[in-house]
């Protein structure tokens, strides 16, 4: 469960094994969908298809001018009439140790009447160490969005949540 105020994470709470605390891809990367990160990317028109997007979604390729572990290269798709990001798919500029390839896809949708946000993130990693090969697939669904009257009210709800509660997120 994640509590945010004006888009910034206030607190995250996980249920289960905390040794592998999940993170949100939009917190790990400087994505080219936030105004403050736009100067860190170059954009070109694309014709890439998106099976998760509305018909007629506009494709835009992006390339990071910064080559670090917070940036990547890929494609985003937008609804041209509503000016909303539908999805993005990218490869990190710098891969984690022992990783040969990584693909990250982020899908967006209507999560509250006046809020368009991340609904699904999928990450696929392939790698090797010496002669051993392996892979990892992470799928994170973000749902049960709610608004609170104040951060204090949100913190109270976060503290009171239990894994079996309706809408409680588990990693």
Image (spheres, rainbow, N blue to C red):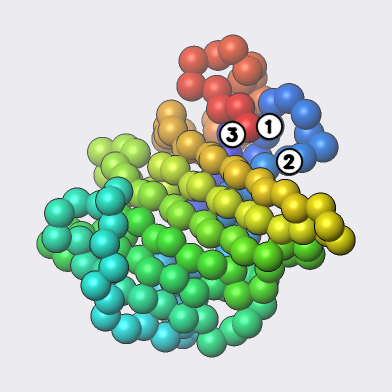
Q: In percent of the image, x 28 and y 57: which residue is there?
A: 50
Q: Do labels 2 and 1 touch, CB within 8 Å? A: yes
State the image coordinates of residue 92 (x, y, percent, origin top left): 59, 69
Asked where in the image residue 139 lies, by quadrant, the reply is top right
Secondary structure state at the residue bearing disc 1: loop
Report the side of 18 relative to 143 (left or right): right
The circle drawn on residue 14 is 1
Q: Of 105 and 25, which appears nearest the observer?
A: 105
Q: In percent of the image, x 75 and y 53: which residue is there?
A: 133
Q: Do labels 1 and 3 touch, CB within 8 Å? A: yes
State the image coordinates of residue 12 (x, y, percent, origin top left): 65, 40
Marks 1 and 3, the one that precedes in the sequence: 3
Marks 2 and 1, the one that precedes in the sequence: 1
User: As displayed, is residue 146 above or below residue 25?
Assistant: above
Residue under numbered circle 3: 1
State the image coordinates of residue 54 (x, y, percent, origin top left): 19, 51
Asked where in the image residue 79 lies, by quadrant, the reply is bottom left
Residue under numbered circle 2: 21
Asked where in the image residue 18 lies, by quadrant, the reply is top right
Disc 3 residue crowd, few under 14, some 14–19, many 20+, Cα 10 Å? some
Q: In percent of the image, x 48 and y 65: which residue is there?
A: 90
User: As displayed, is residue 151 above or below residue 87?
Assistant: above
User: As displayed, is residue 73 above or below residue 90?
Assistant: below
Could you tell me which quadrant the N terminus lies in? top right
Q: In percent of the image, x 81 and y 53: which residue is there?
A: 132
- Residue 10 visible to an observer of this rendering: no
Secondary structure state at the residue bearing disc 3: loop
State the image coordinates of residue 30 (x, y, percent, origin top left): 55, 69
């Amino acid at each position: 469960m994640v509590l945010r105020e004006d888009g910034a994470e206030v607190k995250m709470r996980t249920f289960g094994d905390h040794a592998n605390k999940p993170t949100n891809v939009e917190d790990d990367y400087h994505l080219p969908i936030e105004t403050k990160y736009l100067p860190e990317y170059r954009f070109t028109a694309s014709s890439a298809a998106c099976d998760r997007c509305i018909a007629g979604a506009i494709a835009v390729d992006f390339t990071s001018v910064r080559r670090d572990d917070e940036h990547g290269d890929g494609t985003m798709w937008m609804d041209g009439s509503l000016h909303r990001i539908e999805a993005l798919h990218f490869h990190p500029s710098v891969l984690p140790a022992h990783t040969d390839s990584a693909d990250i896809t982020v899908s967006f949708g209507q999560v509250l009447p006046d809020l368009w946000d991340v609904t699904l993130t999928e990450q696929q990693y392939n790698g090797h160490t010496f002669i051993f090969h392996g892979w990892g697939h992470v799928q994170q669904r973000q749902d049960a969005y709610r608004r609170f009257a104040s951060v204090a009210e949100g913190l109270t709800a976060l503290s009171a949540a239990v894994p079996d509660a309706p809408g409680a997120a588990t990693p």
